[in-house]
Image (cartoon, rainbow, N blue to C red):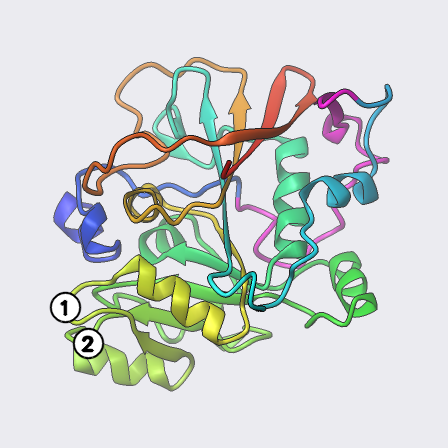
């Protein structure tokens, strides 16, 4: 796919060349499947390095305590919501493995991937990533649903897709089997015929006059009561969020591999606005893989 085709499905600020990449492995996570094992799958065992904690692997409750937030819903102190981004990269900064996106993670990364969805009000993804990574309906595992019900949360997070071109298949399972009506975030000049087709299966929301404005995207989601925004990419969407200074938290998995080549960065495009400092919240280890979490100072 050409850069121009990719640019149609990312915010205007992120229309630079590069492949659209998922933030973490999607296979087995977008559809209901056997629960991802923490205690039963040794490859998914995770321990805490920083801040120092007791020895031994963390169970799901401990991981949820590390990643969870108390201010789940909009309030005077959370009027702008909270944008968490989850991505994975190689040691040398590539967002792909041998040219294929989604190949850098592993069982532990997938375990955290699922838990972050459990915590979210909405999962935000660019349309190019939805297509390229073969996303299905935003349906959680049974254990995740039970956890959310016990806390008076909806069974599943909403699925919000950013697309300037509206090049999405209204007949795909993303829409036809969605447990919650998806939201498509676009702009006022998006093609009218595509808008009409998608409006039958999703809420189509304008977030800009002639290009998608991620600041408006954020505000539109919070106004719907979706304050905990969990972004899974791709790089153009992350680049636009960085340019808008809209990233509150970055969960970065560092895969213990060297990729080389011309693999894309986890973020691309967006007008440079200078460096933004982030504070290290924790570091987890799964074998030689590191799972880091950075927050706004």
Q: Is residue 127 above or below residue 86?
A: below
Image coords of residue 164 (percent x, y)? 23, 64
Q: Is residue 104 above or below residue 78?
A: above
Give me the residue at 76% from left, 20% from top. 52
Question: In terms of secondary structure, where does tag 2 sit?
Answer: loop
- Label 2 crowd (10 A; few <14 / some 14-19 / many >=20): some
Q: Is residue 9 above or below residue 260?
A: below
Q: What residue is pinned by disc 2? A: 188
Q: Name the image quarter holding residue 96.
A: top left
Labels 2 and 1 touching (C-beta < 8 A): yes
Sequence-earlier tag: 2 or 1:
2
Q: What residue is pinned by disc 1? A: 210
Image coords of residue 266 (percent x, y)? 37, 34
Closest to the observer: 99 or 179?
179
Give me the residue at 67% from left, 43% from top. 67
Answer with left or right where residue 33 lies relative to residue 209: right
Q: Which mark is residue 167?
A: none
Q: Is 53 part of what is drawn in magenta?
A: no
Magenta-colored segment: predominant secondary structure: loop
Give me the residue at 54% from left, 68% from top. 226
- Residue 172 visible in the picture: no
């Amino acid at each position: 796919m050409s850069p121009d085709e990719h640019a149609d499905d990312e915010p205007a600020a992120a229309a630079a060349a590069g492949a659209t990449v998922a933030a973490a492995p999607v296979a087995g996570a977008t559809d209901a499947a056997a629960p991802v094992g923490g205690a039963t799958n040794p490859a998914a065992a995770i321990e805490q390095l920083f801040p120092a904690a007791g020895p031994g692997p963390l169970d799901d409750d401990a991981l949820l305590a590390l990643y969870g937030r108390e201010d789940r819903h909009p309030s005077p102190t959370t009027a702008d919501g909270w944008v968490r981004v989850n991505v994975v990269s190689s040691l040398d900064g590539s967002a792909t493995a041998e040219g294929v996106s989604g190949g850098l993670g592993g069982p532990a990364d997938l375990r955290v991937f699922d838990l972050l969805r459990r915590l979210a009000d909405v999962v935000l993804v660019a349309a190019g990533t939805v297509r390229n990574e073969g996303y299905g309906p935003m349906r959680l595992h049974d254990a995740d649903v039970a956890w959310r019900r016990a806390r008076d949360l909806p069974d599943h997070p909403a699925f919000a897709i950013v697309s300037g071109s509206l090049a999405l298949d209204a007949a795909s399972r993303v829409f036809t089997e969605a447990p919650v009506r998806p939201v498509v975030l676009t702009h006022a000049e998006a093609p009218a015929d595509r808008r009409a087709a998608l409006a039958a299966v999703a809420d189509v929301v304008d977030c800009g006059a002639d290009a998608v404005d991620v600041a408006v995207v954020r505000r539109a989601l919070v106004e719907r009561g979706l304050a905990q925004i969990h972004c899974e990419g791709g790089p153009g969407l992350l680049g636009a969020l960085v340019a808008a200074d809209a990233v509150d938290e970055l969960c970065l998995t560092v895969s213990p591999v060297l990729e080389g080549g011309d693999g894309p960065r986890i973020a691309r495009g967006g007008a440079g606005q200078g460096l933004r400092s982030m504070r290290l919240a924790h570091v987890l280890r799964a074998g030689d893989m590191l799972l880091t979490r950075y927050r706004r100072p």
